Amino acid sequence: MLLILLFMAVFAPAITIFPYNRSSGPALSPPAAPHVLGTNDLGVDLWSMICHGARVSLTIGLGTALLAGLGGSAIGIISGYKGGFFDEVVMRIIDMTVALPNLPVMIVLAAFFGPSLLNIILVLVLFSWAAPARMVRAATLSLKQQPYIQAAAHYGAGTFYLLRKHFLPELFPLIAVSMIRLTGRAIVAEASLAFLGLGDPTTGSWGLIINHATSFSGIYFTPFWKWWLLYPWLFLTMLVTSLAFLTREFEDALGEKRI
């Protein structure tokens, strides 16, 4: 499923006939040739919108995972290895970040910063880095007690040398699993913000498609929901489910079933 969705996102211009941002047929047409998934109330082809929406979802998911996963992991490694006052400050910041109700605060920040793709990624990163930082810090505390780590430090190995040569290679599987999990969560969070009308209206994300569908008068009293609402929800569910399966497979393969 994930490979299919990646193919859709990468080759969206090649596998779609109609534009995703302007009318190309009768309004609210049911699925039939040439509009295989039907059209919305403006006559925009839903298959084109879903293919280009996959680009938005994967861009936000991967961007958030890279920034929050790598950044949070780096903070967790340094905090766990250094300890002391720096570790206490980092842990208190992590506790405050985890304690905040994510969705309400994200709604406020997204409304404050404005609906752009970069702002959405930054807001999601702000509430996503704490989980990988806490997990990696816990693993670092255990790893730095290993005899070979202590021996390397005793013989003069510097902090960055230890981080690059020992901690990162050992902790990379944990970081990779955490980043895959963050990708799925970021995609759901972006869809939630877009569904509430806080997404970038120019991107045409899946959450925005669902938002437009549910805003249409009588969507639940007409057959329009069968394609206008169902298909974007189905593709969103497929993407999040495939990422969840991939995370579980990595956890099983790496022996980290309850990370």
Image (cartoon, rainbow, N blue to C red):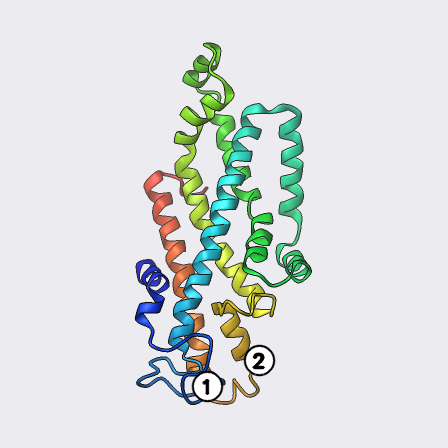
Disc number for residue 215? 2
Q: Secondary structure at mark 1?
A: loop
Measured as percent of width and height from the top left, residue 183 is found at 46, 53
Q: Which residue is mark 1?
A: 224
**Crowding near the residue tagged with mark 2, few <14, some 14–19, many ≥20 C-alpha atoms within 10 Å:** few
For residue 153, above or below residue 2: above
Q: Nearer the viewer, residue 114 or 169?
A: 114
Q: Is residue 236 visible?
A: no
Tell me the amino acid under the disc marked 2: Ser
Q: Nearer the viewer, residue 18 or 54?
A: 18
Q: Secondary structure at mark 2?
A: helix
The image quarter in which residue 6 lies: bottom left
Residue beneath the point at 41% across and 44% down:
177
Q: Is residue 91 left or right of residue 221?
A: right
The image quarter in which residue 85 lies: top right
Measured as percent of width and height from the top left, residue 65 is found at 48, 48
